[in-house]
Image (cartoon, helix red, strand yellow):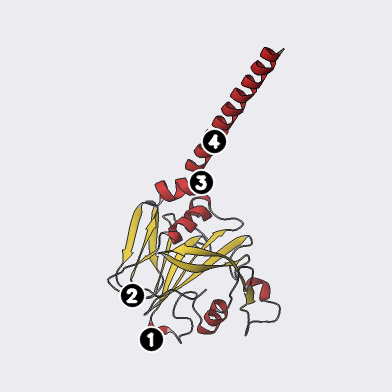
Amino acid sequence: MKKLIIILITISLILLVAYKYVTNSKLGNDEVNSPASVTSNNLIKKVYSNPDLGFSINMPEDYKIVKEGDYSVRIMPDAEVLGMGPTNFVYISVVKPEMKNSLGEVYNYNSEQFEKLIALENIGDYVDLSKNSPVGMGEWFTYTVVAVEDIDNGKVKNFQNLKPWEFPSGTTENRFIYGTEKNIYILGYYTGGEGIQEDSKVDPRIAYSMIKSFKIIKWLVTKILTPI
């Protein structure tokens, strides 16, 4: 009887060890092959540097750079988009000291709206930026702090708008504000939306990984982080 009990206990221990081994192996493989990991390691290896605006960012090989005036660029799949034009893209805007009181000259920058955004302190805080717009426009101009991200060794707030103005229904914007001693950098991306042309879609995981790869070109500016 004792031998039987010992045998049963031994078999149980062997099964337990085998289960843990299989489970740990599976978890490890899932981690290595997770979409975020694949995106970060394999899909955004090309480095785009802009010395004039003072930054670099990683991007997929099949994406293109489109200038948006003198202070902004858009990064998107290299596809010819019919109709209203691209609605999925990553953007980077640079607000230089002489532009800090400007209105409409830097993509997605408005000094009054900027101050309201950076005043949000905690995850879950939100603000309606629709002042001076027609009544009832708040749902298109509401931004919520959804995370604080590590970007270029700093802490940067991630603001999200689930219904950005003038974009197709179902589009999401994520906006990040990064401050330096000299410039304000507004980083962001638009993803999703109804009726989007397949070859022009931006995977939000790719867009997020691109933003996370953003770096200030060190020899141009001395970094100071935006307070959180």
Total marks placed:
4
- In the picture of the structure, the residue carrying the numbered disc 4 is 24
Q: Are marks 3 and 1 in contact (CB under 8 Å)?
A: no
Expressed as whole percent of the image width and height from the top left, the position of residue 26 reads: 54, 35
- At label 3, the amino acid type is Pro
Q: Secondary structure at mark 4?
A: helix
Q: Nearer the viewer, mark 2 or mark 3?
A: 2
Q: In this view of the protein, can residue 203 be seen by the observer?
A: no
> Around disc 2, counting alpha carbons within 10 Å, would you say few (fewer than 14), some (14 to 19), or many (20 or more)?
few
- In the picture of the structure, the residue carrying the numbered disc 3 is 35
Q: Nearer the viewer, mark 4 or mark 1?
A: 4
- At label 1, the amino acid type is Glu
Report the residue at 47% width, 67% height from top: 155
Q: Secondary structure at mark 1?
A: helix
Disc marking residue 222: 2
- In the picture of the structure, the residue carrying the numbered disc 1 is 98
Q: CA distance from mark 4 to mark 1?
A: 55 Å
- At label 2, the amino acid type is Thr
Instruction: Identify the image quadrant of residue 73.
Output: bottom left
Q: CA distance from mark 3 to mark 4?
A: 19 Å
Q: Nearer the viewer, mark 3 or mark 1?
A: 3
Q: Are marks 2 and 1 in contact (CB under 8 Å)?
A: no
Q: Nearer the viewer, mark 2 or mark 4?
A: 4
